[in-house]
Image (cartoon, helix red, strand yellow):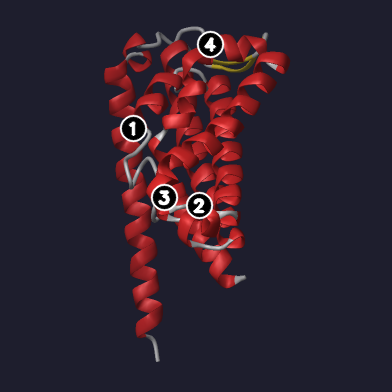
Amino acid sequence: MSEWFRVFKQGLSIENPLTVLMIGLCATLAVSTQFQNALFMGLAVIFVLTMSNVLISLFRKAIPSEVRIPIFIVIIAAFVTIVDLVMKAFVPGVYAVLGIWIPLIVVNCIILGRAEAFAYVNGVGLSIADGLGMGIGYSTVIVLLAFVRELFGTGHIVWFEGTLISLPSGYAPPSLLLLFPGAFLVFAFMIVGARWINERFEARKEAAACRP
């Protein structure tokens, strides 16, 4: 169980796919203009990443290494299709905004990278931990990024037809935050914060290891 949690926690901080590994940035910066859309995108990635990890790990010994990448893509595409159809049926408004970014999860570097680097060489239990950790780590960053950009870029947070949070009426939101330069700026601060947390975590581990 300790190994399971170790793998799970790596995706949250030490090997976070966005702030540390720096993969899957295109969709992240494009989708993170609205909190609502980012949340659904994060949930979609968690589902696809975890389920594809499970299936690939389960059948890894039966998958020939020569054709593993095409097989990975087919498996991932199957789960992306499920997400695509479910979102289209139950949250059509969100689906209309996310548009092409849902099908493009198939070629997201995070999904394919974890299939190749982890699920293909590890058991089902650890692959679930990796999928959940990486997925939640990704979702945490994209949701926080979207929250900051939408709140300070528009002055409020919208949830479907309602308003969750609204800044004072005198606040003049800078539209820069909703553009790509604003996304890069906010994301840069998030990287700094994540690395600061990781360094403190590693320092505590080293200090604990040196104690008699």
Three-letter amino acid code at the position of disc 4: Val
**What element does badge 2 sit on?**
loop
Three-letter amino acid code at the position of disc 3: Glu
Left/right of residue 2 with respect to residue 207 in the rendered view: right
Of badges 2 and 3, nearer the viewer stands 2
Left/right of residue 162 with respect to residue 116 in the rendered view: right
Residue 171 location, x and y as percent? 44, 11
Residue 204 location, x and y as percent? 38, 70
User: Which numbered circle lies on residue 63?
Assistant: 2
Q: Earlier in the sequence, mark 2 or mark 3?
A: 2
Measure the alpha-carbon separation of dots 1 and 3: 27 Å
Residue at the disc numbered 3: 116
Left/right of residue 183 with respect to residue 76 in the rendered view: left
Residue at the disc numbered 1: 187
Measure the alpha-carbon separation of dots 1 and 4: 22 Å
Residue 208 location, x and y as percent? 41, 79
Neighbours of disc 1 within 10 Å: few (<14), some (14-19), many (20+): many
Residue at screen point 38% across, 49% down = 66
Of badges 4 and 3, nearer the viewer stands 3
Residue at the disc numbered 4: 97
Neighbours of disc 3 within 10 Å: few (<14), some (14-19), many (20+): some
Residue furthest bottom as drawn = 212
**What element does badge 3 sit on?**
helix
Measure the alpha-carbon separation of dots 2 and 1: 38 Å
Q: Earlier in the sequence, mark 1 or mark 3?
A: 3
Vertical placement of residue 135 versus 61, above or below? above
